[in-house]
Image (spheres, rainbow, N blue to C red):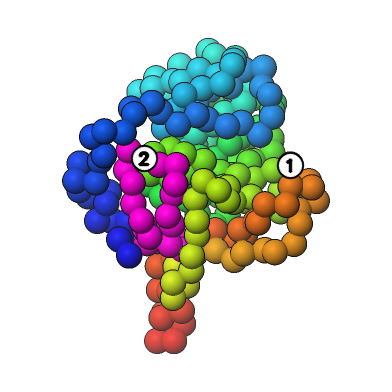
Amino acid sequence: MVPVREVLDRREQFLNPRATKAMAMLRLPFATTGCVLMGRKLRTPERTTYVEEGLIGRLHLSETRMLAATPAVLRRICAAVEARTMALPQLCEAIVALQGVAEGMLFEGERDMLWRCFGVPVYEQWLGLDGELLAWECGAHQGLHFQTGRAELEEVAGELVLTSWYGLRTPVLRLGTGFAAEADPQVCRCGDDRPMVRGLRPYKLREQRVLCAAAG
Ligand SMILES: [Zn+2]
């Protein structure tokens, strides 16, 4: 098992020089009339534009109806909207939270924060090291559908261990992701029968809490 920190700290040692440099594709929960992607460079579907993080201050000038961004970028935008230094009046479709092994997750309560701040549904996604989509939230909002066939998840001592058959630039077998989650065997209301993961969260945080509780 390879701890994720080891891969992120020494990324060049894990890169496959023979793999295609083609980027993974952003997948949106539904067709958009104008989406902005920030924080993670991916190939974009129609009517989606990648905007550099440094141009965050100009976001209000765009017709952003859907916003797909990493947790760090979403926090920055949210803070600016709440401080009334930015407004996104066109944002009416969705927020797509691009979480990942490298990008990290929304913290507890931040999903509600996004809802309060933007007033549109939040669709969480979970990306692998090459930006490949590993799991996504559908319109039923019951959890994340895991992309079986592209990747495999195991649970080792409570931690999610990932093997991705799709991420070929950074091929890792049995990557200790630093996340924990529950598997849900029930078929989702949306009819997609791929297995769902619920309650995706940092693995260590929870462990620490348990330790703190025990110490207290
Ligand atoms: Zn579903």
Label 2 and label 1: CA atoms lie apart by 30 Å
Q: Which mark is on residue 168?
A: 2
Q: Is mark 2 within 8 Å of ligand 1?
A: no
Q: Residues within 10 Å of mark 1 (few under 14, many from 20)?
A: few
Q: Is mark 1 within 8 Å of ligand 1?
A: yes
Helix, strand or loop under label 2: loop
Nearer the camera: disc 2 or disc 1: 2
Task: Name the spot of residue 25 as percent of width and height, x first.
Answer: 50, 29
Magenta range: 160-179
Residue 90 is drawn in which quadrant?
top right
Residue located beneath label 1 in the image: 139
Viewport quadrant of the C terminus: bottom left
Task: Name the spot of residue 183 as percent of width and height, x first.
Answer: 62, 64
Determine if residue 83 is in view: no
Residue ID at (60%, 44%): 136
Residue 65 is drawn in which quadrant?
top right
**In the rendered view, would you say 167 is above or below 177?**
above
Magenta: predominant secondary structure element? loop
Magenta span includes 86: no
Residue ID at (50%, 59%): 153
Helix, strand or loop under label 1: loop
Relative placement, left or right, of 117 versus 213 is: right
Determine if residue 212 is in view: yes
Between discs 2 and 1, the one toward the N terminus: 1
